[in-house]
Amino acid sequence: DMKVTQMPRYLIKRMGENVLLECGQDMSHETMYWYRQDPGLGLQLIYISYDVDSNSEGDIPKGYRVSRKKREHFSLILDSAKTNQTSVYFCAIPGHAEQFFGPGTRLTVL
Amino acid sequence: QQQVRQSPQSLTVWEGETAILNCSYEDSTFNYFPWYQQFPGEGPALLISISSVSDKKEDGRFTIFFNKREKKLSLHITDSQPGDSATYFCAASYMGYKLTFGTGTSLLVDP
């Protein structure tokens, strides 16, 4: 079974602090995704990584950056977090034609 | 502009009834449509999917009906169980690239 891990699962930060969300996978998939999920908005794509150091903006990249130095790990970084970045963040890897999601990180920015 | 729309936003059915969740899309290039089920505190999990070459896909109590001409899909959950209470997301893509998600339908099955 494909497994996607995310750390931490819960995080509370103050506005202006830096945030690092980590995602890991055990299948050496080249492609990985970061989404955020907000009530009433579904899942919105933030960034796609096609392999190490090969990243592409998704639909809502503003305020975020990513890092992929090893194929197994994909990080989402918020430099100077804002209150409107309070959300649940999901990492995903591709399957045959669908995507497999991690358990999510619930981020609260106060 | 929301390219994938879902209705209703929330739905309550009695145990044993059939729940019908609707989805529509705008982009005619979309040809793959997965439905995801999400329980509170968990990530979305693939439930069932259909490609545009089919008009129906069945998996146990879950059936997708697809109308390509009208760009509409529906997910039917027959003999609904309390354990089916979850949020269901319709998604669409071209050949599995870059999924576009709907806003979800929250289903509650009353025992």
Image: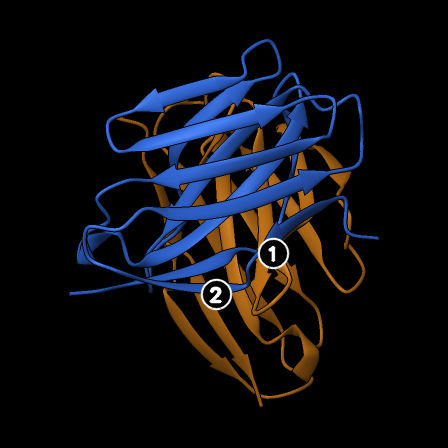
Chain colours: A orange, B blue
Q: Is residue A35 above or below residue A48?
A: below
Q: Nearer the viewer, residue A104 or B17?
A: B17
Q: Residue most toward the top?
A: B53
In the image: residue A23, left or right of residue A33: left
Chain at numbered mark 1: B
Of badges 1 and 2, the one in the foreground is 2
In the image: residue A37, left or right of residue B59: right
**SS class, disc 2:** strand
Q: Three-letter amino acid code at disc 2? A: Ser
Q: Residue A3: image x %, image y %?
A: 32, 35
**SS class, disc 1:** loop
Q: Mark 1 to mark 2: distance in Å?
A: 11 Å
Q: Residue most toward the front?
A: B17
Q: Which residue is mark 1?
A: B103
Q: Nearer the viewer, residue B51 or A83?
A: B51
Residue in the image at 55% along x and 22% along y: A30
Q: Residue B27: image x %, image y %?
A: 80, 31
Label 2 packing within 10 angstroms: few (<14), some (14-19), many (20+):
some
Q: Three-letter amino acid code at disc 1? A: Thr
The answer to whether residue A102 is visible is no
Q: Nearer the viewer, residue B60 or B15?
A: B15
Per the rendering, the mark at residue B17 is none
Q: Residue A90: image x %, image y %?
A: 50, 52
Which quarter of the figure is the N terminus of chain A placed in? top left
The answer to whether dots 1 and 2 both sit on one chain is yes
Q: Is residue A85 above or below residue B36?
A: below
Per the rendering, the mark at residue B10 is 2
The answer to whether residue A64 is visible is yes
Residue in the image at 60% along x and 56% along y: B103
Q: Is residue A26 above or below residue B104?
A: above
Residue in the image at 55% along x and 45% along y: B22
Nearer the N terminus, badge 1 or badge 2?
Answer: 2
